[in-house]
Amino acid sequence: MAGLAQREQSPFDLSSEAAYQRWRERKLEQAPRTINELIIEVEDAENLSAAEHAALLACCRRANMAIYVNRKHDSSKDVARNVGRQFGLVNLDANWLADEDGVTQITVNSEGTRQGFIPYTSRPIKWHTDGYYNSPERQIHAMVLHCAQSAAEGGENRLMDHEIAYLLLRDTDPELAQALFAPDAMTIPGRMDEDGVARLAQAGPVFSVGKNGVLHMRYTARTRSIEWRQDEATLAAVAMLEKLLDSALPYIYRARLEPGMGLLCNNVLHDRAGFRDDPDRPRLLQRARFYERIAGS
Ligand SMILES: [Fe+2]
């Protein structure tokens, strides 16, 4: 069976040690040593040249992420969507708090429906991948986070390629990595999500492999409103993951998005530091989340 043969060669399959070792070697060889290797200056992010597009895509192929620095800074909210479109990202996840066009404006809201939900405050946000509370058919595979205005102080992101997280877990103990593939590894109880939307309980895996053989990760370091599968391997895997993300590993990058800069990624692990706003120029990030991965990455 072709499907079976393909599965046997997946580096994300515990039984295919040779495929894993080949993938692992290449992944580590290509992994950026510093965030600078992932930062690409572009003339106009909404109309990338072939060379700029290729440079951003090369970063995404290595590390599932790239940061563009737009010389033509334009705070129009279409930038995130238009950057995505150039990488085959067209199916936007329109969550409840997104505007009609599916792009979410992330800024501090002291009133209205968004009030009190962490993304719309200046508080830190723990490590996560986007849309971990979405149903299986609405999982987020890519996103663009475009900075229209940075905070007066703080608001940095830490970033980690989710494939590296898998690799480090599997190197530590293959059984731990495997435990996180369980279809009920992580359950979000039916209540409110981070954006304040009422939802049914969502059970699902942390790691899954899509039809195209790519690894997807669904994760949050939140400790409230999360139910982990209560078995030894799952709990040990979660503890190990927390430890990895809390370490000073060279694979954890730090970046502060300044106006005109943006993160293009295959929904990698990220967090956000708390920040302090200048009341006259509050931090504003425009976020577009997509159901597909960056084309060609
Ligand atoms: Fe996020």
Image (cartoon, helix red, strand yellow):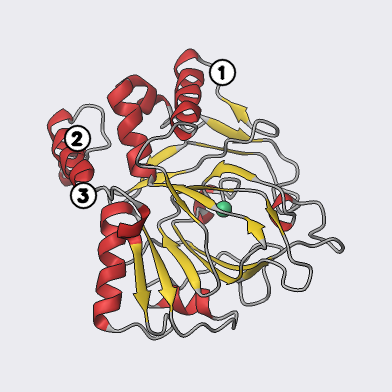
Residue at 71% of width from left, 62% of height from top? 96
Residue placed under numbered mark 2 in the picture = 20
Q: Position of residue 102 (x, y in %)?
A: 61, 71
Picture quarter containing residue 23?
top left
Task: Tell me if I can see residue 215 in this picture.
Answer: yes
Q: Position of residue 238 (x, y in %)?
A: 50, 26
Of helix, strand and loop, which one carries label 1? loop
**Mark 2 near ligand 1 (CB under 8 Å)?**
no
Tell me, for residue 230, which label it has, or none.
1
Instruction: Identify which amino acid the numbered label 1 is placed on.
Output: Gln
Of helix, strand and loop, which one carries label 3? helix
Say above or below: 159 vs 229: below
Residue placed under numbered mark 3 in the picture = 30
Classify 10 Å Cα crowding around label 3: few (below 14), some (14-19), many (20 and above). Answer: few
Instruction: Specify the quadrant that holds the N terminus.
Output: top left
Instruction: Identify which amino acid the numbered label 3 is placed on.
Output: Gln
Residue at 12% of width from left, 32% of height from top? 18
Nearer mark to the viewer, of 2 and 1 = 2
Nearer mark to the viewer, of 3 and 1 = 3
Label 2 – label 3 distance at C-alpha: 15 Å
Residue at 54% of width from left, 84% of height from top? 74
Instruction: Identify which amino acid the numbered label 2 is placed on.
Output: Tyr
Q: Position of residue 141 (x, y in %)?
A: 44, 56
